[in-house]
Image: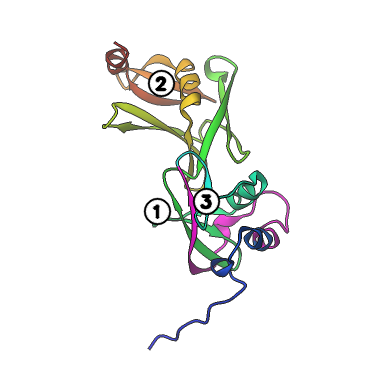
Amino acid sequence: MDEKKTPNPSSLASVGDAAGLEAMIARAARAGQGAPPVERWNPDFCGDLDMEIKTDGTWFYLGTPIGRPALVRLFSSVLRKDEDGKTYLVTPVEKVGIRVEDAPFLAVEMAVTGNGDDRALTFRTNVGDVIEAGPEHELRFVDQPETGGLKPYLHVRGRLEALVARSVMYDLVEAGEEMEIDGRLMFAIRSRGSVFPVMPVAELHRLSQ
């Protein structure tokens, strides 16, 4: 018979307030320099936490929005999405599950520099990450059959992505161009030598009519 584990009162899953979580994660994840190496940590799963990231990028804990941007940035630094498709807060000693409505991050600003193959699209996320789209950070576009539109996503790290905010989507479209890809005329986005197809040009023209 499996032996039941006694809940650890100092574990992430048992902390009853956001300030306590902040202190624990700060001790576990910020001892070194740079971003925490969450992909290398393999702690035990300690249960689910009543935390959720909404589509608009708002974080909720125990049903209440987390109003401190610094606290959200701290939590975001130890996020990891595993092969099971679930998202976790991970420290060297434990892993707790959280809920994500869409993507864990939101791309809220974009800058375009350079031209042609030297063009670079740089995004800022709601938690302060600055990501340059390219070979290591791809853009992908997901069809929305219910609206006929597209949802763009930017790879941030690991299996984590940022949903490109609607306001930034317009800037993204302005940065697009028509080009032939695999024998088809496509509307695509170019950044750091990588080309990210959006849709066939004929389909784009149909939607704009």
**Residue at point 60% right, 75% down?**
9
Q: Nearer the viewer, mark 3 or mark 2?
A: 3
Residue 100 percent location from the top left of the image: 44, 49
Quarter location, residue 10: bottom right
C-alpha distance separating marks 1 and 3: 20 Å
- For the residue carrying disc 2, how many other residues have a C-alpha within 10 Å: few (<14), some (14-19), or many (20+)? many
Q: Is residue 194 visible?
A: no
Q: Is residue 127 magenta?
A: no
Q: Is residue 50 magenta?
A: yes
Q: Which residue is mark 2?
A: 188
Residue 196 percent location from the top left of the image: 42, 27
Residue 122 percent location from the top left of the image: 58, 28
Secondary structure at badge 2 equals: strand
Question: Magenta part of the protein: which range?
Answer: 25-54
Q: Is residue 97 above or below residue 143?
A: below
Q: Which residue is mark 1?
A: 85
**Residue at point 60% right, 52% down?**
75
Secondary structure at badge 1 equals: loop
Query: Three-letter amino acid code at disc 1?
Result: Gly
Query: Three-letter amino acid code at disc 3?
Result: Phe
Residue 125 percent location from the top left of the image: 57, 36
Q: Quick one: label 1 or label 3, which is nearer the N terminus?
A: 3
Query: Three-letter amino acid code at disc 2?
Result: Ala
Q: Is residue 16 above or below residue 173?
A: below
Label pair 2/1, CB-CB below 8 angstroms: no
Q: Quick one: label 2 or label 1, which is nearer the N terminus?
A: 1
**Residue at point 52% right, 24% down?**
191
Q: Nearer the viewer, mark 1 or mark 3?
A: 3
Q: Which mark is residue 60?
A: 3
